[in-house]
Amino acid sequence: MEARHKSMKAFGSELASPEVQLEIINRRNGFPSFDEKYKETGEEKLRAGKIEIMQVNLGKMCNQVCKHCHVDAGPDRKEIMTRETMELCLSALANSGIQTVDLTGGAPEMNPHFKWFVTEIKKMDKHIIVRSNLTILVTNGFEDYPEFLAGNKVEIVSSLPYYKASFTDRQRGSGVFEKSIKAMKILNGLGYGKENSGLIFNLVYNPVGAFLPPGQECLEKDYKRELAKNFGVVFNNLYTITNMPISRYLDYLLASGNYEEYMQKLVNAFNPEAARNVMCKYTLSIGWDGYLYDCDFNQMLELKVKTGNSRHIKDFDHHILEGREIITGQHCFGCTAGAGSSCGGETA
């Protein structure tokens, strides 16, 4: 955050908020607004469709401090979802047609009610995705979590910035790659990532620097070949996700002088087809405190949904939320660049 303030002083008044200063930078570079660019899809406004996925942030506490983390997660974060809020989420699920629940953090496993919540969701016969950082699964006190996840047939999605230790540790911390491989071997031993096991294990690639991810299909082949050859581990799919210019990654872009160039790349790579399939059209994001957001990135920017009558999970009404106008910003260009980016990888 400090780097964000210092780096923007040259572009606007020091009295202006960081958001206003970013707007000054965007205007001086002639970047169009996302709403203006979105009209190239043939639609006037970006609107939500039927909600298919409930993405729930269980808290910002994490055992890692990754450079690219848009949540600003870490061991010192105290924000955590309560069991009461989880019960409200379960009630909303029971009164909707949502079939998939996507659990995120921080490290979602660090929520003290994690196992209870997963068990209750499973009773409703919903598909569960857990976004695990892998290292938490080999941390003291969490050693039984892999078996718990396997027993509930939870799909695991994990970030692994590269198939070489140096790149991964540079982004996620010293020793993270080695611990990640150890966790992957444990998951493989339970059947995760193996054909016909019914246990899905997917990896996520985030670029280390200020550039867009390469093609998902080719990179997946590289990952599978190198990880199998060098470490004897397997997985199902690789998702490539573009780094959003918010939070810690925004700090990096500003401190390194790469913000304007990176934003220009995102704007130039705008793909109308990717924009038509952005995840906010079918995903609803629930904050750790129960407030509703169009996506996980809007959640971190504290941009709540526009619907005044259903802005918290206690007031959940899918009739109101479906068809709502989605709040957009310059960060949305990250989801629509090139082949597109979502929590499930490419969109176009």
Image (spheres, rainbow, N blue to C red):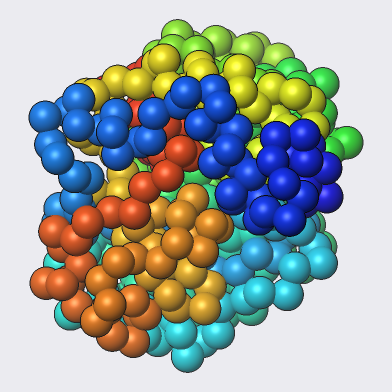
Image spot of residue 38 (x, y percent): 25, 33
Of residues 133 and 189, the one drawn nearer to the viewer in this rendering: 133
**As drawn, is 33 to the left or to the right of 307?**
right
How many marks are shown on the rendered structure?
Answer: 0
- Tell me: residue 121, above or below residue 208: below
Quarter holding residue 24: top right
Residue 18 can be seen, yes or no: yes
**Which residue is at a point 35% across and 36% down the rendered structure image?**
34
Q: Quadrant of residue 50?
A: bottom left
| Above/below status of 183 relative to 262 | below
- The answer to whether one can see residue 138 in this image is no
Determine the residue positioned at 70% across, 30% down.
Answer: 253
User: Viewed as shown, does residue 29 lie left or right of 76?
Assistant: left
Name the spot of residue 89 as percent of width and height, x first.
36, 78
Question: Relative to 265, does residue 37 appear above or below in the rendering?
Answer: below
* Farthest right residue in view: 174
The answer to whether residue 27 is above or below residue 21 is: above
Instruction: Classify the position of the C terminus by image quarter.
Output: top left
Image position, residue 270 (x, y; %): 35, 21
Q: Is residue 103 left or right of residue 79?
A: left
Question: Which residue is painted at 45% across and 26% down in the image?
Answer: 31
- What x and y, as percent, mark residue 238? 47, 27
Residue nearest the observer in this picture, 340 or 24: 24
Relative placement, left or right, of 94 versus 246 is left
Identify the residue at horizontal 20%, vertical 31% (top origin): 39
